[in-house]
Image: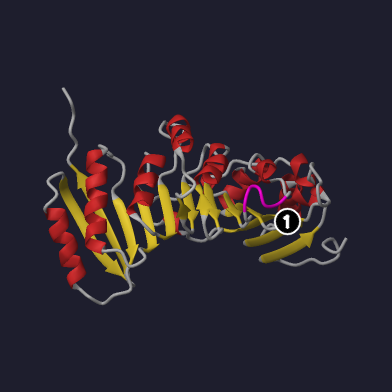
Amino acid sequence: MFIKNFNCKLKVLRYKTQSNDVTYLYANRWKELILKYFPQLEKFYFQYEDVPYYGHQSPAYRKVDFNQFISSFWIEKRWVFKSEIDTSAFIFKIYPYKETWYDRNSSIDYSKSSQLTIRYPSMNECSIDIHGILRVAQFYHLEIKRKQIDISTLMDIICRLSELDSLKIHSLSLSSTCDSSMEEINRCFISNKNKITKIYLEKFNKIEEINFLIKFCPRMNYLHIDSINNMDIELFIKEILDKINNDGNQYFYTLCLSIPTEDDKIIEKFKNIINSNKSIVWYSIKCILDVIYLQWEKRIITNI
């Protein structure tokens, strides 16, 4: 009623609601509204927050087809879909695309921009239905904002998100990894099912974590690490290159490290390490705002 009596050439629309009325989540209704009344709309910010009752096993959002939010109408306008799991709520958002870490140095496919963010503490620490939201739409990017996540929990989540292209986590916990967990990794992830190509690790503690990620995501080609926790950086680079050589990994070719230092000698040290690696045929190193970007090409060895 308001829109019908308010004729304007709206450019930006922001709408936020907390409700259990799922009609707010019908993408086609928003599409019809925008086409009819806001044909000049350039930016659309929408947020819907669903706070389920304690112990409620069938949240309202389960009735919604969220894939409608990644149809051609939304893609052409570059309005992307994002879902968040908070401690006690499900949050769904539509907002104009903005560059993210996983889009750098690669072509952008807006049809694969849907993202899931989990602020949820643990799979077993709350009654909120995490598995339900993993099935509502096709997600290509996952960010877990828990300070530390154990391997079994990470595997449980990723097993349900088969099209993931990027993963961002704060840090890994390998302490709970046991033989059965590693067998599960071999069964579920060392295969073509895992499509993750980009990983962002905010905090790194030991080289075993990188070894795990290389094995966990065999198609990984990009790794960004914010903190290496006072580890010997030269030894770190050498061990990574040795690891990918020994495993015959042909995908991994970009490493980004946040190193708050003005020591230009670190670049020369990196060059010496790479030059000593006979399998590297080309490499590039650059430093931008305390972030070192290292790229390389390996010699491809074929068995005849």
* 132 to the left or right of 289: right
Between 29 and 269, the one nearer to me in the picture: 269
Under tag 1, what secondary structure? loop
| CA neighbours of label 1 inside 10 A, class few (<14), some (14 to 19), many (20+) | some
Residue extending furthest top? 304
On the image, which quarter does residue 224 sit in? Answer: bottom left
Image x and y of residue 252, in percent: 31, 45
Residue for badge 1: 89
Inspect the image, locate mark 1, and give the three-letter code of the amino acid beneath it.
Ala
Residue name at image x 27 percent, y 50 percent: 240
Residue at 35 percent of width and 44 percent of height: 214
Q: Mainly helix, strand or loop, the magenta region?
A: loop
At horizontal 74% and vertical 51% (from top left) the residue drawn is: 30
Which of these two is toward me, 52 or 71?
52
| In-image side of 138 versus 287 (left or right) | right
Q: Between residues 283 and 175, which one lies in front from this camera angle?
A: 175
Of residues 293 and 85, the one nearer the viewer is 85
Answer with the quarter of the image where residue 93 lies.
bottom right
In the image, which residues are magenta? 122-126
